Amino acid sequence: MQDFNRYIPHTEEEIHKMLDAIGIRKLEDLFQTIPREVRLSKALNLPEPLPEPELFHHFQRLQTPVMSSFLGAGAYHHFIPAIVSSLVSRSEFYTAYTPYQPEISQGTLQAIFEYQTLMCQLTGMEVSNASLYDGASSLAEAVMMANRVTRRKKVLLSQTLHPEYRRVIQTYIDPDQQEIILIPYEKGGGRTDEKMLFDLLNEEVSAVVIQSPNFFGVIEDLRPIGEKIHHLGGLMIVGFSEPIAYGMLHPPGATGADIVAGEGQSLGIPLSYGGPYLGIFTTQERFVRNMPGRLVGETIDLDGKRGFVLTLATREQHIRRERATSNICTNEGLCALMATVYLSCLGKEGLRELAMMNLSRAEYTKKIISLIHGCKVNFTGPTFNEFVLKIEKDPKKVLEKLKKEKIIGGFPLVKFYPELDHHLLVTVTEMNKREEIDRWANALERALKG
Amino acid sequence: MAKIKDTGLIQDEPLIFEQGGKGRKGYSLPRWDVEVAEAQSLIPTQLLREELIGFPQLSEVDVVRHFTRLSQWNYGVDSGLYPLGSCTMKYNPKVNEEIVKMSGFSNIHPYTPEDLSQGILKLMHELQSFLAEITGMDEVSLQPAAGAHGELAGMMMVRACLEARGERRKKVLVPDTAHGTNCSTSTIASYQMVEIKSNEKGVIPSEKVAELMDDEVAAIMVTNPNTLGLFEENLGKIAEVVHRKGGFVYCDGANLNALMGILKLGDLGVDVVHINLHKTFSTPHGGGGPGAGPVAVKNELAPYLPIPVIEKDGEIYRLNDDRPYSIGKMRAFYGNFGVLVKAYAYILSMGAEGLKRVSEMAVLNANYLMKKLKGHYHLPYDRPCMHECVFTDRFQEKYHVSTLDIAKRLIDYGFHPPTIYFPLVVKGALMMEPTETESKESIDRFIETMVQIAEEAKEHPDLLRQAPQRAKVRRLDEVLAARKPKLRWTGNQ
């Protein structure tokens, strides 16, 4: 008996009984509707199956060493309380499908309803869907929705929007039918250039997409931009990659955002080399029927008892087919559950204190940098937990030196901004202790001298 | 009436917003070792928020009890047979859940320098080649986050390839048995959908395709086996017809569980296929994701794969962004890595022989189920099926009992219902996919229950119409939910 049979319960005797019941003689006969000439005559070329102990060993060797890290740029290292993993590991949650049968899916449905509420509270908006794939694809869906709502085809993207998000929006948009225009950033402050934005804005513009805190970590001033866009009949889409910031920052909903879409990974979801993450998507009630994604609503059962169901499904692909608002089906349900448990655990005070701690550690870092020769904070705009550092030496060489001391020192911005070729994006969260920051600063100082 | 109901273990559980209170705390942050920054002096006041209105304040115990209670109202694969057709609800191996939590995977940042993440890149590169081997394709992108996302990537590649040839085609052929995602994907990829009628055998006739196929058609989107659980026996011929007119064959690989080691889709002339790792490759569905929908292509479409592509250069693995013909990016970073790890672990556990066994047992279970239920329920396409079979409520109609009633009655017996009212070509469809991880006795129990429900439909139809009686809630008012949408808690505001 092979090891893989642990997942396949059939005994030889049962197989024969079942074949008899069907009225065929051998397993091969099950595939009689497949033309013989296309059936495989030899086995697939795959490695020999591994028993469970060897499997563990195999993966141990593939792991990447964990180092002291100052990386952020759209994915953040935050502390995840033990209860998040413990609760989402309940297999009634993770081995269930999308809750199509509400009577035996009330757990998933109530949790999503709570998730939707938390996302509305966090972003200051009126409606949230049950999640999309990630921040980038969520923003792409937001842009498509704005084009549907306004029936306009020109979209302005701030250059301070995460470059990977911009690239995804570009992929989703059909260039023959829609147009994307980039708004440059202010070289001093690191914010979206408001003047350029106002120059580009007109009555053909469907939406303006701005991220805050932006890719440089700088907090944007959204309100005046929103007012101007609305005056011309367009929508303001606010993106984000670090939702912990909303523990202390004004929620986008209060600044005139029509759609808020971004990345929820910070809310209790592991870094996991880029996914699975959580696409958050919230909007105002008047747009609900144009929204992409699943929605859970409250209702009552035959006895008048409160219960929850998937609702407004006539927007969705399985009902509306080619006229659906999106093609999304499977979303990121379990990641949404992680965020719900995480935020329930942190609560009102915890999220605020966590945000303060991120800000404080980043400010401490800025302070000690000011004492190091050969580097300075590049933009003057206010930041949250990441900022751009300009260094006099070649960033590639500096990062290599830090790596030798087991520190990943920051993200070289030249990858996305050729003009920022001496610049690092440095991220400091509650996970970077003071002594770790000091060690990083010392290593940086040595690297800049040597 | 008494104030507290004797609900047994199915207790009522308020929303998180309706419990706890000011000052209750469930979190523990790292020690403060730096000065507390003065937010007001660093950030303009108008950019700061006052408080998080409505946010819960709970202790850790409150949170644990709350979500534990919620989980008890759910039904998962670990609870029992989950015969949801087209969803392949097979057992999700526990060891894979443990592996993905290893710190050297879960704590790794996506922008970690490549020389440090060689093991991770090797894993992804090998998974690509395994999936290419299983499907008979040339190259694979692991980027799409779900099946529908893979479809979109695939159709964008088709569009890009045609554009590179200087052609802007307008239409996509989709059979009437298709998943709804195929239809909406073609619209989002800027194509107009043209429906093909399946024939009396439940498959696409190649003559129909030949009639509709012209140089305006970019591709045909086919699910094989299709959503009736039938093998699209004409696909080889259809592919020839489509290719002759310069079109592409897209295959929705949602039902790959029937075919591993039996045949390669690439050998049937498929140009591009997506694979649902959360179906065929055992990664859990998570109550609605995360999944992963890698997309596999033949060489002609390879230049258009999303970036970055993972390449092997000697012994070194690299993420290559420099692909001038690429459609771009489908999402940030590289894919749902955590899901990819589990699928890779599954393939390594099974090997070639194991995967073939999976497909054989999945098809055996479905045919056995079909044979045993035939006569009790109407079988619209009475021919050998693949991994799933489709019945209808026609025999029960005369007792004024519907597919919905049958599905809800199954809940009273402790089973998850099958997929209902899909595919659309079958009126009152009950689409059942047992998967290979169900034992004979588990399927026998299900069969006995279904037979008993068929009897009840005759003798006591009200038992079905009133079902479920033994779940957390009775039937819910979906009309009310849609007419007066209440999509968040607004309690004490």
Image (cartoon, grey):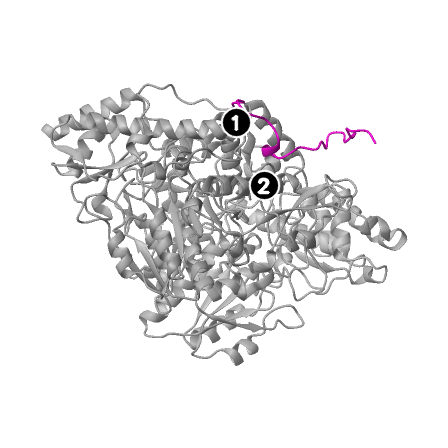
Where, quadrant-wise, is the N terminus of chain B in this rendering? top right
Residue at image position (43%, 48%) is A261
Q: Residue B235 at x, y = what percent?
A: 53, 68
Q: Nearer the viewer, residue A86 or B100?
A: A86
At label 2, the amino acid type is: Thr
Give a yes or no on whether discs 1 and 2 share a subunit.
no
Give the overall secondary structure of the magenta segment.
Answer: loop
Up/down of B12 relative to B301, above or below: above
How many other residues sit within 10 Å of disc 1, few (<14), some (14-19) or many (≥20)? some
Q: Is residue A211 left or right of residue B435?
A: left
The residue beneath circle 1 is A83
| Disc 2 chain ID | B
Residue at image position (70%, 44%) is A103
Q: Residue A28 at x, y = what percent?
A: 61, 56
Q: Residue furthest left?
A: A450
Residue B10 is one of the magenta-drawn residues: yes
At label 1, the amino acid type is: Ile
Q: Residue B438 at x, y = what percent?
A: 66, 43
Up/down of B8 relative to A221, above or below: above
Q: Is residue A118 left or right of residue A377?
A: right
**Magenta range:** B1-25
Q: Residue A322 at x, y = what percent?
A: 53, 66
Where, quadrant-wise, is the C terminus of chain B in this rendering? top right
Q: Marks 1/2: CA distance?
A: 26 Å
| Disc 1 chain ID | A
Mark number displayed over residue A258: none
At numbered mark 1, what does the secondary structure look like: helix, strand or loop?
Answer: helix
The residue beneath circle 2 is B490
Residue at image position (62%, 27%) is B65
At numbered mark 2, what does the secondary structure look like: helix, strand or loop?
Answer: loop
Residue at image position (49%, 78%) is B213
Q: Can residue A69 be seen here?
A: no
